[in-house]
Image (spheres, rainbow, N blue to C red):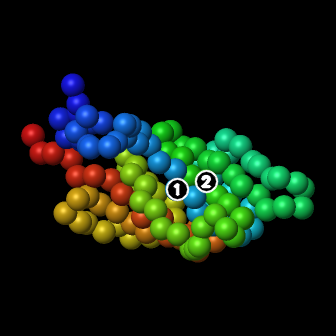
Amino acid sequence: MGDPILPGPADIPGVETRPVGSIPILPMGDPASALAWWGRLGFAVEFEHRFAPELPLYVGLRRDMADVHLSQHRGDTTGPGVMYLWVDDVDEVAAEFGVPVDDNPWGRDCQIVDPSGNRVRVGTALRASA
């Protein structure tokens, strides 16, 4: 039986499978400053890859169930990029980065910008009232 909200493979003509997750790939300038900044958001390095020592760096980061990849390869992405990150407490993130929180119909969010110019919207969904 398919998901009651999302269509299942049998519900979409010609589609055998459906996505189970996604990973944004954002451009990265200086690796040291980028990794320190993402570390402030609670992301840890899962892997680093270079095809050769003199070639650009590609890094996989993870925080809980969220993955982000940062790349110095100019063919991977044009940037800067934008992503939306859901967290349990947007106020904690806003306080860490010294930015205001906006109230919206879908929840509360703020915007922060990494050292490479990527915009990260960070939000907490509204809780249903009892």
Residue located 21% across and 47% down the image: 127
* Disc 2 + disc 1, Cβ < 8 Å: yes
When the figure is inspected, residue 113 is found, relative to residue 13, above or below; the finding is: below
Residue at far left of view: 130
Pinpoint residue 116: horizontal percent, then vertical percent. Answer: 63, 71
Q: Is residue 2 above or below residue 74?
A: above
Mark 2: few/some/many CA within 10 Å (<14, 14-19, 20+) = some
Q: Nearer the viewer, residue 85 or 16?
A: 16
Q: Earlier in the sequence, mark 2 or mark 1?
A: 1
Q: Please give the residue where the numbered disc 2 appears in the rendered image.
A: 69
Amino acid at dot 1: Pro
SS state under label 2: strand
Q: CA distance from mark 2 to mark 1?
A: 6 Å
Q: Residue at x 67, y 68 (%)?
A: 75
Q: Is residue 64 left or right of residue 20?
A: right
90 or 63: nearer the viewer: 63
User: Can residue 95 be seen?
Assistant: no
Across and down, in percent, residue 54 comes to 89, 61
Write the residue at 39% across / 51% down.
86
- Looking at the image, residue 98 sits to the left or right of residue 40; the answer is left
Quadrant where the N terminus is found in the figure: top left
- Which residue does the numbered mark 1 point to in the structure image? 24
Residue 22 in view of the camera: yes
Q: Secondary structure at mark 1?
A: loop
Q: Nearer the viewer, residue 77 or 101?
A: 77
Which amino acid, mark 2?
A: His
